[in-house]
Image (cartoon, rainbow, N blue to C red):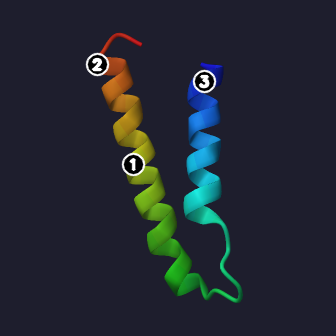
Amino acid sequence: MPRHLEKVLAHAERQLAPAGDVQPTTVLPLYKKFLRIEEHRLRLKHQAGG
């Protein structure tokens, strides 16, 4: 599990790092996309028996 946590944290740093003065209306889609990708990764890992 630590390896997965490292991947999630690295992905979060890349995708969710604030780029200057960002408005909430532009941040929300980024968070939704991030969650959708991570949920998909978890489903794949679970289906593979991990």
Tell me which amino acid carries mark 2. Gln
What numbered label is drawn on residue 47?
Answer: 2
- Pointer 1: what residue? 37
Disc 1 to disc 2, C-alpha distance = 15 Å
Q: Position of residue 19 (x, y in %)?
A: 66, 79
User: In terms of sequence position, does the residue under pointer 3 or pointer 1 come before the other?
Assistant: 3
Q: Is residue 35 left or right of residue 8?
A: left
Q: Position of residue 9 (x, y in %)?
A: 64, 43
Q: Is residue 33 left or right of residue 48?
A: right
Which of discs 3 and 1 lies nearer the camera? The answer is: 3
Along the line of sight, the residue nearer the viewer: 37 or 14: 14
Taking the spot 55% from the left edge, 76% from the top edge, the residue there is 27
Q: Are marks 1 and 2 in contact (CB under 8 Å)?
A: no
User: In terms of sequence position, does the residue under pointer 1 or pointer 2 come before the other?
Assistant: 1
Which of discs 3 and 2 lies nearer the camera? The answer is: 3
Q: Position of residue 36 (x, y in %)?
A: 38, 52
Q: Quadrant of the N terminus?
A: top right
Disc 3 to disc 1, C-alpha distance = 17 Å
Farthest top residue?
Answer: 49
Tell me which amino acid carries mark 3. Arg
Along the line of sight, the residue nearer the viewer: 29 or 17: 17
- Pointer 3: what residue? 3
User: In terms of sequence position, does the residue under pointer 3 or pointer 2 come before the other?
Assistant: 3
Farthest right residue?
Answer: 20
Q: Are marks 3 and 1 in contact (CB under 8 Å)?
A: no
Label 3 Cα neighbours within 10 Å, binned few <14 / some 14-19 / many ≥20: few
